[in-house]
Image (cartoon, rainbow, N blue to C red):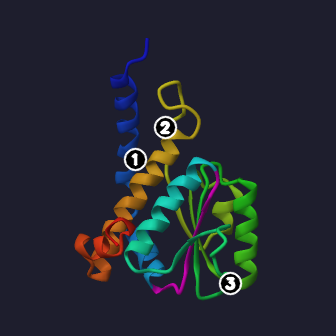
Amino acid sequence: MTTISDSFEYIMRNFENLKELDERTVSDICSLILDSRNIFVYGVGRSGIVGRMFAMRLVQMGLHAYFVGETIAPVVTEKDSVILLSGTGETQGALLVAQICKRVNAKIISITSSVDNSIYKASDFKIVLKTKNSSDLAPLGTLFEASCHVLLDTMVALLMSMKGEKEADLRKRHAIWL
């Protein structure tokens, strides 16, 4: 019988892979985000939920961020960056977004689980999250999605530092405090 502790330990061991990320690449991506007129985020399913959380934090930092497909999202241009979250790197919706971005010369940032996929190949900036295999302790895409969430929240801290923001600054833009 699986216990909460078994699953927790399996998931937490997966996060060790985040220490292997190239900090220069992540820093360059954060610089690109700060230099973009608009930041678009896209993912499907649970990856999309993680993407929405990241877009919310970007807005709370005072940036112009949108989730692709929302009714208030403007048209993407060459002055924008688009972040695609896809564990497989073959999600059809994300591939379509990448094609549109290529046509208008928007910068594409991908977060996938391998280098052998279409979204990775179409991207200008790339992060690969090497996750453990799924199992009954963390089924389907759980490890990728959880790793994305942790990565993007650590990027929020870096973006805040680069922008000279503190938590109090974000709190002023948080909907609950209005």
**Residue 173 is one of the magenta-drawn residues:** no
Residue 110 in the image: state x and y as whole percent: 58, 64
Q: Nearer the viewer, mark 1 or mark 3?
A: 3
Residues at discs 1 and 2 in contact (Cβ within 8 Å): yes
Q: Which residue matches tag 1?
A: 17
Residue 176 in the image: state x and y as whole percent: 35, 65
Q: Residues within 10 Å of mark 1 (few under 14, many from 20)?
A: few
Q: Which residue matches tag 2?
A: 132
Residues at discs 1 and 3 in contact (Cβ within 8 Å): no
Residue 121 in the image: state x and y as whole percent: 67, 64
Is residue 21 visible to us here? Answer: no
Please, what is the three-letter code of the amino acid marked with disc 1?
Answer: Asn
Q: Residues within 10 Å of mark 3 (few under 14, many from 20)?
A: some
Secondary element at tag 3: loop
* Mark 1 → mark 3, Cα distance in angstroms: 32 Å
* Mark 3 → mark 2, Cα distance in angstroms: 34 Å
Quarter occupied by the C terminus: bottom left
Residue 159 in the image: state x and y as whole percent: 35, 74
* Mark 1 → mark 2, Cα distance in angstroms: 9 Å
Secondary element at tag 2: loop
Q: Which numbered circle lies on residue 162? A: none
Relative height, residue 67 to residue 92 (above, below):
below
Residues at discs 3 and 2 in contact (Cβ within 8 Å): no
Please, what is the three-letter code of the amino acid marked with disc 2?
Answer: Lys
Residue range (magenta)? 35-44
Q: Which residue matches tag 3?
A: 105
